[in-house]
Image (cartoon, rainbow, N blue to C red):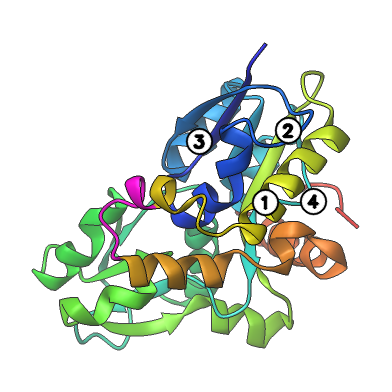
Amino acid sequence: MALSLAVSPCPNDTFVFHALAHGLVPGAPPVDLTFADVDVTNTAALDGAFDLVKVSYAALPWLLDDYELLPCGGALGRGCGPLVLTRDRTDLNGATVAVPGDRTTAYLLFRLWAADQRPARIEVVPFHQIMPGVADGRFDAGLVIHEARFTYPRYGLNALVDLGEWWERDTGLPIPLGAILAKRGTVDPAAATEWIRESLRHGWRDTAASQKFILANAQEMEPAVVRQHIELYVNEFTLDLGKDGLAAADALLGRAAAAGLTPAVPSFL
């Protein structure tokens, strides 16, 4: 029976899961792969739609009854945080802000950072519409992630804040962006952890093997941007969250619960 897996088409996910999705991991079951934006998987996971699924850390408080956090495969790191972009604003009071999803880690970080500001309206829009929308004045500001940190100057935009820098300065911890979850009672988490780690190791051993798959799903990203994306988001935390990765998840969700933004969850440590 095939294992249902849902990840984003972003280069870090396609790099990590290429071998698993293509039957190149010894002992792993066949995989039924679905590509979806993380805001979609955050919602689909509420219904237990997938055996393994990539979601935002911010969505975990609503998912941990049915899913278990795996210690690998996700996106954490330093210097890789979401950005708040504007044309020329120096604050967000009275602003209309475009965001890529209301249960994303990016939006949760934004809410923690912007606690003393008063945006007039938040609009959830598809990610690819955010930078053009800020550039042409439809939005006063936009919250962006992933490859946008490499491309936003092309739109004539400025970074009002790098939420990753803000987070790291305040906590000393990496920023927890995307998590891999295994469905309880359906997937053996220890086995799934080894499948994903071997898939990642396969990618590191033979970087050329996955290039066609990565580029085909990279939403017209230039090869140089794809390379930067993978180098930034596929790192030691992808192989093993470790103590710092788990502490980062605790800090994010602990602060969110204390601020009344999410339900409380038990510590991961």
> Where does the image place residue 258, in percent across and percent down from the top left?
72, 61
Relative to 186, does residue 269 appear above or below in the rendering?
A: below
- Looking at the rendering, the stretch of residues picked out in magenta corresponds to 215-222
What number is the disc on residue 71? 4
Q: Which residue is the site of mark 2?
A: 182
Query: Tag 4, which secondary structure?
Result: loop
Relative to 118, does residue 216 appear above or below in the rendering?
A: above
Q: CA distance from mark 1 to mark 3?
A: 25 Å
Query: Tag 1, which secondary structure?
Result: helix
Q: Is residue 254 left or right of residue 139?
A: right
Q: Earlier in the sequence, mark 3 or mark 2?
A: 3
Q: Earlier in the sequence, mark 4 or mark 2?
A: 4
The amino acid type found where label 2 is placed reads Ala
Q: Nearer the viewer, mark 2 or mark 1?
A: 1
Q: Residue at x 35, y 72 (%)?
A: 224
Q: Earlier in the sequence, mark 4 or mark 1?
A: 4
Q: Main secondary structure of the magenta part?
A: loop
> Does residue 219 belong to the magenta stretch?
yes
What number is the disc on residue 202? 1
